Amino acid sequence: MVQKPSIPKGTRDFGPVETARRNYIFSTIREVFGLYGFSPIETPSIENLSTLMGKYGEEGDKLLFKILNSGEWLKDLEGESFTASDSAKLTSKVSEKGLRYDLTVPFARFVVQHRNDLTLPFKRYQIQPVWRADRPQKGRYREFYQCDADIVGSDSLVNEIELIQMIDSVFEKLGIRVVIKLNNRKVLAGIAEIIGEPERLTDITVAIDKIDKIGIENVKVDLAQRGLSQEAIEKLVPVLDIKGTPEERLNQLKSLLSNSETGLLGIAELETLISATTQLETKAEIDLDVSLARGLNYYTGTILEVKALDVEIGSISGGGRYDNLTGVFGMPGLSGVGISFGADRIYDVLTALNLFPDTVTSAPSVMFSNFGEKEAIAAMRMLKELRSEGIPCEIYPDAAKMKKQMTYANSRCIPFVALVGEEEMAKGMMTLKDMTEGTQTLVTPEEAVKIIKRK
């Protein structure tokens, strides 16, 4: 018995309806990117591991999909023995490439590699799949699309304000109510200073980034395991739990971080962003979340995350400021900031809330019936006229029984069926059947175009 084929866990097939709906998401995001002056680029799915490793922190490195070298890679291991603790050494021997983990690091590599061809500030968007060797669960996949927009070559907070407006515009167009959570890595650095652990910023951010998933008690255990003193942990917890409006939280942070120059700078940046979103009448809810850390090591300033208000799911967009990312590729001092939309999670939110428009479909607007060879040719002449007017349509390929043809049209939710028999051929007309209303009318191709477009 032949084994039934399957796909890897954490990946999915998409049929015509799902693909049409995904394209609706992509086109909505792409439209907004274009309105804000961003240009498209693409980078390879495969990057050198030297490009990817060390850019996402310890956790991220573990989630990289690594690709075995082609050819006889085993012969390079002859005479060598490895234990479980030598996995990193073994990997370096058998793998030089990996699937990209996100679009930001490849973009930084792109900027450095093509620096002489770019005009700064450079604004790019990129809509491509990424891969992570994560444990699959609801809303978390091993292969998924990201929709990124980044600006490099400018450290102005105008860029962050524009990105927040883009997020607001995308989710307004999609009909999703969201909250945009803001924080600043400088604020987190200031907190690390006041609790007496300035050298442990990475450990702190990696740990507190898990608060929503594992709770504060487990975060405290994690921090202790990472070497933070009990005194530092007890100082940290109340800071993460400050309450009030964004403005009230900022005032509390000002008091707590009064002795941290770095922390106060982060607070000033947050004040600018929150004030601008108010003046620009941002429709999305804006929140200050001191526990927001976005555990990726390359963030240096503003960080943000977007949550859907009406569905329990992880973040559906996020991003931040990264001043030093291109420096690891030999181009220091180039500031950047960007956001990423998680198209797959957005798809799940739209599905859960039944927000996809009825017009988002893979089906054509019209199916021409097939009564035989002569009738099919006459129908195809009319079909050609409708297509020239931008109306998607098809002809049933076989002269099958009419019940079978109508069943096909119904199963594909095709709104109109055009009947072209001998009588219609003689008049150069078609009988247009509205599959929703159940009515039919004898019309010319020109009249059919008006009816179909009107509906």
Image (tube, rainbow, N blue to C red):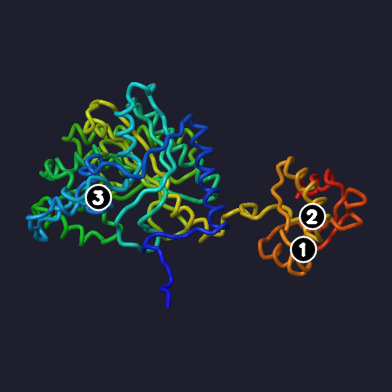
Q: Say which of 378 and 269 sits in front.
A: 378
Which residue appears at 8% of the width and 53% of the height? 229
The x and y percentages for residue 234 are: 14, 54
Nearest-to-viewer mark from 3 and 2:
3
Name the one closer to the observer, 397 or 351: 397
Residue on which disc 3 sits: 71
Q: Position of residue 432 (x, y in %)?
A: 82, 55
Q: CA distance from mark 3 to mark 2?
A: 54 Å
Q: Which residue is mark 2?
A: 376
Q: Quadrant of the N terminus?
A: bottom left
At horizontal 28% and vertical 39% (from top left) the residue drawn is: 184
**Local SS, label 3:** loop
| SS for callout 1 | loop
Amino acid tagged 3: Gly
Q: N-terminal of the two: label 1 or label 3?
A: 3
Vertical position of residue 111 compared to residue 131: above or below: above
Name which residue type carries label 1: Ala
Q: Is there a contact, CB below 8 Å, between mark 2 and mark 1?
A: yes
